[in-house]
Amino acid sequence: MALVLNVSLCSTCKPHLSLSTSNPNKASSTFPFPLPLLGLNIKKSLQPSQKLTFSLGESVSGATLVALLSASFIFVDPALAFKGGGPYGQEVTRGQDLTGKDFSGKTLIKQDFKTSILRQANFKGAKLIGASFFDADLTGADLSDADLRNADFSLANVTKANLSNANLEGALATGNTSFKGSNITGADFTDVPLREDQREYLCKVADGVNPTTGNATRDTLFCN
């Protein structure tokens, strides 16, 4: 397969280089690189606005060609950068200050709230299956009646939150996750891995039956 370089020269602009192949089905690529950087030895005698076409052969090393073709992958459009959010929610929610924001009743399955500030945020009745609250601050947040199955609360601050009637089946609460001062009446903690000190603390305030699963909160925490 032959590679062809097309160089456009004019009296008022910088030379531009395009790389194309002998295959008509392949699109050409344009690189605004000064020709000396490509290691090309070009003999030219051109008038302004004339075009020079030459073949790229063995004079260009394989390493130079690889670097040339790789350039289009190095410069990424900032618009394509990760913006957070999840497959069921388009808003940016990762690493944000969302204090007091109202998410009540919303479907936010697998939503990413990692490291966000969610103090006094309202998640009442929200569907948060598989959502991530890793290292998030949920102080005073309303999570009552929320579907939190398989949600990740690792390292999260869930103090003074309202978890009444929430379903946390299979949720993660590893590390220094704290539920101190939270209302857990009717919450279901089935299969939630808790530190022993956290479990003992929650058993002191546990009460009620989850209206969705029918499980008593104390039973899901294995309280004596």
Image (spheres, rainbow, N blue to C red):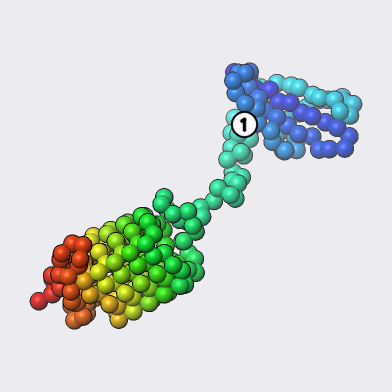
Give percent across and percent down for residue 60. 66, 28
Residue 211 in percent (x, y) is at 20, 66
Residue under the image location 85 percent in, 25 percent down: 50
Question: Could you say which is closer to the camera, residue 133 or residue 174?
Answer: 133
Residue type at the position of mark 1: Leu
Asked whether, in this view, residue 115 is left or right of residue 34, the answer is left
204 shown above or below 18? below
Q: Is residue 134 visible?
A: no
Residue visible at 76% across and 34% down in the picture: 16
Residue 122 visible at all: yes
The foreground one among 216 and 68 is 216
Q: Residue at x 13, y 75 (%)?
A: 223
* Quarter the N terminus occupies: top right
Residue named by callout 1 = 65
Q: Quadrant of the C terminus?
A: bottom left
Of residues 216 and 80, the one drawn nearer to the viewer in this rendering:
216
Q: Is residue 123 above or below residue 10?
A: below
